[in-house]
Amino acid sequence: MANLDSTIVEKEIIKSVDAVRKKFKIDAVVNGDCSPGGIGIASQVLLNVMRRLEGTLGIAIPHNCYIFHDKKTKRQLTIKEAVEKLIKNATDGN
């Protein structure tokens, strides 16, 4: 498991998701309570966000861990929930 600060992780996810929102001209507020999948950002794009986070945070996210969705509840996660999932599952990067 990687040693990550939740505040820093949340800030980086918000920054990345907000950049995508602007690029695709999505009219939504991006904050910790925002669900990126819920505002219309496709999972393929969010996978790219996850790869950027790996580089920015110096971590590795397992391939079977999609931080923006909960398989059990079949629900899109908020950024705050994604932070928790990322911290729980990420390992130190290269």
Image (cartoon, grey):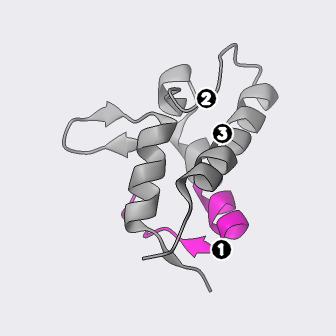
* Left or right placement of residue 19 versus residue 68 in this view: right
In the image shown, does 63 or 90 lie closer to the viewer? 90
- Given the current orientation, which residue lies at the most extreme left position? 72
Q: Quadrant of the C terminus?
A: bottom right
Tell me, for residue 31, which label it has, or none. 2
Name which residue lies at 47% across and 39% down. 80
Question: In the displayed structure, would residue 70 be above or below residue 89?
Answer: above
Name which residue lies at 57% across and 45% down. 46
Q: Position of residue 49 (x, y in %)?
A: 64, 50
Q: Position of residue 26 (x, y in %)?
A: 70, 18
- Given the current orientation, which residue lies at the most extreme right position? 23
- Look at label 3 and name its amino acid: Ile
Name which residue lies at 19% across and 43% down. 72
The magenta segment is 49-68
Kindly report the distance in space between the C-alpha atoms of the residues bearing marks 1 and 3: 17 Å
Q: Secondary structure at mark 1?
A: loop
CB atoms at circles 2 and 3 under 8 Å apart? yes
Residue 56 drawn in magenta: yes
Tell me, for residue 58, which label it has, or none. 1
- Look at label 1 and name its amino acid: Gly
Q: Quadrant of residue 81?
A: top left
Query: Crowding at label 1, few (<14), some or many (≥20) Cα neighbours within 10 Å?
Result: some
Name which residue lies at 64% across and 26% down. 30
Q: Quadrant of the N terminus?
A: bottom left
Dot 3 corresponds to which residue?
Answer: 14
Residue 86 drawn in magenta: no
